Image (spheres, rainbow, N blue to C red):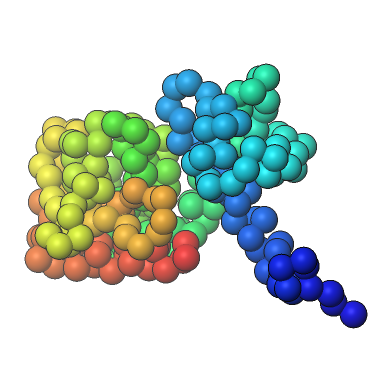
Amino acid sequence: MVRPDPRGRLPAPASKESSLTLERGLALLQAVADAESEAPSISELAAAIGASRAAVYRLLVPLQSRGLVRREGSKVRLGLGVLRLASNVLPQLRLAAQPALRTLAEHVGATAHLTVADGTEAQAVAVVEPSWTAYHVAYRVGSRHPVHRGAAGKAIGLSPEGRQWVHSTGELQPGAFGVAAPVRGVPGLRASVGVVALEKLDGDVVGPQVVRAAQEVADALR
């Protein structure tokens, strides 16, 4: 028989309690990650997630056991377990993006890529080259450039209310033409899908194809 507490309230179902605990644990991890320099204290974390210090101590136990955070006295920092999780992100992004990039590369006849913002830089994390062209741009996975340069970087910063795609000419490589569109609707991801070629691309034709590919990538990641 389920008994009410002294205030007459029935205990929450176990599934709801588990959900609330998970939500608070994730909020705590996010609060630790959001500290840009000085490691937050237990009291600061309690204030950040709206919980008691005792609750923060309890929530830290499973996070510490998995290496996601580490304690330094009353301070809390991210642990190396976060790096292990992060190392699995890019392979999953590549896998999810491959079908859309392959279709885009073959239809346009240009090298297609998924580019992700990393601070002030943009990094190519997936690249697919067309199979039928006589020549095409060789674009390496891992290539980086300032996020404000090139179609791939500029597309990441496009406003949702503005243009759907952007083009560039020779900003990253002399004689190269690029068209890119932002990947939208994936929480925490700032990215774009684009193509780069050694001949001028017709934006009115290629732009909508790039936008469609970016949407397909977003759908694959949700």
Q: Name above or below for residue 41 compared with residue 105.
A: above
Say left or right for 167 vs 214. left
Q: Is residue 102 visible?
A: no
**At 48% across and 52% down in the image, what residue appears?**
93
173 and 80: which is toward the camera: 80
**At 67% across and 28% down in the image, what residue appears?**
70
Q: Quadrant of the N terminus?
A: bottom right
Q: Name above or below for residue 153 compared with residue 182.
A: above
29 and 142: which is toward the camera: 29
Q: Is residue 141 visible?
A: yes
Quadrant of residue 149 in the image?
A: top left
Residue 167: x and y, percent? 13, 50
**At 68% across and 44% down in the image, what residue appears?**
55
Quadrant of residue 29 in the image?
A: top right
Q: Name above or below for residue 174 compared with residue 94.
A: above
For this orientation, the residue located farthest to the right is 1
Residue 187: x and y, percent? 41, 56
Residue 76: x and y, percent? 61, 27
**At 40% across and 59% down in the image, what residue appears?**
186
